[in-house]
Amino acid sequence: MAIRVMLVDDQALLRTGFRMVLAAQPDMEVVAEAGDGAEAIENLRSTAVDVVLMDVRMPRLDGVEATRRICAEPDAPKVLILTTFDLDEYAFSGLKAGASGFMLKDVPPGELLAAIRSVHSGDAVVAPSTTRRLLDRFSPMLPSSTAEPQHKDVAKLTEREREVMLLVAQGLSNGEIAGRLVLSEATVKTHVGRILTKLGLRDRVQVVVLAYETGLVRAGGQAG
C-alpha cells in the first residue's frame, strides 16, 4: 500500500515541486495539500494520511502548533518538519511538539524520499547527534511546552533500560550502544522498543527530548 502523504506549506510552488517528486514514486501518493496548519488539521478529518510534510512558518496556524495538535490525536500520522535553516528554533519546538524529525527544505530528493519512508516505518529521521546539537543550543532558552511531561514514567524503566535511554539521548546508534554495553544490536533494539512503550514516546527523537526535559541529560550531552 502506498504511503499517503499530505503537503503543508504556504508556498504553492514548493508544494508543486514536492508533489512532482513524490508522484514519481510507486510507493507514495500525495493525498492532500494545505496552505497552513489550520487547513491541514481540517483535511485530516476527512482524509487518511500516513506522513505529513509540515512547514513551520505559515499564516493562521504555524507548523509547530499544528504538529502539537495533530500528534495529540490517537493514531496520528507521523510529522516531518520542513525548515529553511538548520538548527532553527522552530525545528526544536517541532520536535518537542511530537514531530518525528526535521529536514531542510533544500534537501536532495533522494534524502527526502528516504526520510518519508523512514518516518512511515516508525524511525526518526534526525540523527540523534543532530537532535542533541539542536537541544544543546536551544534547551537553555526555551521553556518546556508542558509541565513535567512523562517524568514519573522514567521510574518504570529497568536499570538496563535506563542505561540504554541515556546512551540514546547522548547520540549513540543501536550499534554503538551494543558495543558499549556488550549486547547484540537486536537486544538493544528490543530495549529501545520497551523504553518507547513504557514512556509513551513515538521514536528516538522524543527519547532525547525527554531526557533533556527531565535532566537525565544536560546540555553538552552529558548524563545528569
Image (tube, helix red, strand yellow):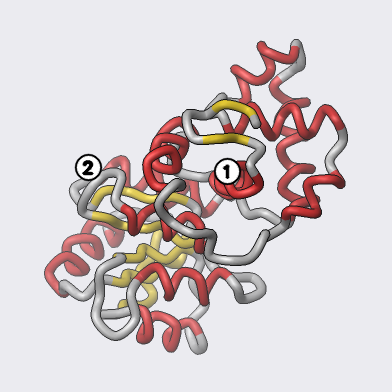
- Calculate the distance from the C-alpha at mark 1 to the C-alpha at mark 2: 31 Å
Image position of 10 with respect to 191: above or below: below
Which residue ends up furthest to the left in the rendered image?
Answer: 13
Residue 165 image position (x, y, % from top left): 69, 34
Helix, strand or loop for disc 2: loop
Residue 1 visible, this angle: no
User: Is 185 situated left or right of 79 in this image?
Assistant: right
Residue 147 visible, this angle: yes
Most foreground residue, 216 or 68? 216
Residue 57 image position (x, y, % from top left): 25, 69
Residue 113 image position (x, y, % from top left): 35, 48
Image position of 79 with respect to 61: above or below: above
Helix, strand or loop for disc 1: helix
User: Is 79 situated left or right of 82 in this image?
Assistant: right
Residue 24 sits in which quadrant? bottom left
Image position of 117 with respect to 82: above or below: above
User: Is 29 situated left or right of 128 in this image?
Assistant: left
Q: Any mark on residue 223, and which?
A: none
> What's the amino acid at mark 1?
Tyr
Can you identify the residue that label 1 sits on? 212
Can you identify the residue that label 2 sits on? 108
Give the residue drawn at x 22%, y 42%. 108
Give the residue drawn at x 36%, y 63%. 53
Which one is closest to the eye, mark 1 or mark 2?
1
